[in-house]
Image (cartoon, helix red, strand yellow):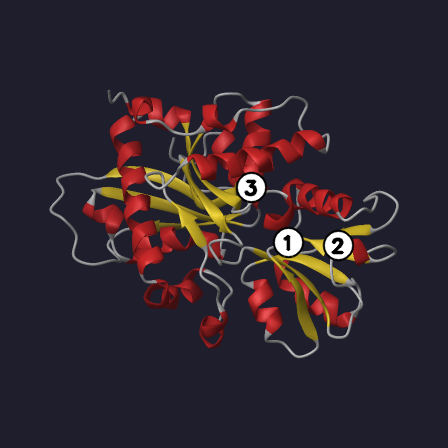
Amino acid sequence: MLKKTLAAASLVTVFGTGPAQAACSSYEEVTSAWLPIMQTTAYYVALEEGLFEKACIKVNSNRMQSPNHIIDALVSGRADFGPPGAAAGIAMLAEEKFPGTFKVFGLQGGGIEVDLINDGLIVKTGSDIKSFSDLKGYTIGHVPGIQWRTITRHLVRAGGLDPDTDVTLVDLAVPQQVPAVLGGSVDATLSLEPVGSIAASTEGVDRAVINPVAMVIADPFYSGAAVLTTTFIKERPAVAKKIVEIIDEATALVMADFDKYKAIIPKYTAIRDTQLDLLAKPYLRSFSDLNETDLDSYQAFVDVFYSEGVMKEPMDVRTKILKMSDFGDN
């Protein structure tokens, strides 16, 4: 299941870049597809700390341009796993179309109770927009794709407005979000971190609402997921299990000392060294962390796709979560 190239991706073979490697007589090769966002931080740490090499794994690491590209690569068999940060909602939309393709082994986002930021409503300083209920007649941007369009529509509806007639929704690439608000091409944008934290420190732009999605859909709210393909699990269960263990270890490192590990983020994302102090710590939940609250929150999110007419039938997310028995363990 190994390919040398992926559409809309840049391929980097990650091998020997971390600390001294374990003595391995051979290496298992796996292919990942990932997004350069905050939610993927545990994967960056796993690469930098040499955790894959220590487990005798060589990763063909594919940086993708959108969440849809990750899911396409996984569905087509061009990648074995999506590290943290793959779109949690799009993964389930793909599951509806191609049942039995994925197993989720982690969730990423933020929340009000845990006091960690995932998203925000960004407006121009002095704007009369204070919440989604104030958006009538305005244009609002969102991260491109079906996941964030569906979320935005749902939040507009929860604010008492009709997303089809009361507002104009615009796909807005992450780097364009703050400039679009400043320039007036949109009146507001629903942003993912770190856009909100950077915007809050930018003259002329304010964050009107922190974690608006958690206020409406579920607290905590998870927009990201880590996923394995079931083909990978079935064909190489021992290697797939190692991937889960590596991401679990890296997630624990990040959550224990984000200030230490955030220094590597500019290497993998568009974040600049000068912006590191602005970054909000993400809420990363590894496979070993996942509990009923997490699964209830994920279910609430996926239910939105059904209520908004994007999914044809309800889906039980618990049937899509990885179990140790999937590896053949008792």
> Which quarter shows the N terminus?
top left
> Which quarter shows the C terminus?
top left
Mark 2 or mark 3, which is nearer the start of the sequence? Answer: 3
Label 3: few (<14), some (14–19) or many (≥20) C-alpha neighbours in 10 Å: many
Q: Of residues 318 and 225, which is closer to you in this image?
A: 318
Residue 190 x, y percent position in the rendering? 67, 56
Q: Which residue is drawn at 73% across and 30% down?
A: 309
Q: Residue at x 30, y 55 (%)?
A: 253
Whether residue 281 sits left or right of residue 50 in the image: it is: right
Q: Name the residue under label 1.
A: 212
Tell me the SS state at disc 3: helix
Mark 1 and mark 2 residues within 8 Å of each other at the beta carbon: yes
Mark 3 or mark 1, which is nearer the start of the sequence? Answer: 3
Vertical placement of 197 versus 291: above or below?
A: below
Q: Mark 2 points at which residue?
A: 132
Type of residue at label 2? Phe
Q: Which residue is the extreme one toward the front?
A: 113
Tell me the SS state at disc 1: helix
Whether residue 117 sits left or right of residue 49 in the image: it is: right
Mark 2 or mark 1, which is nearer the start of the sequence? Answer: 2
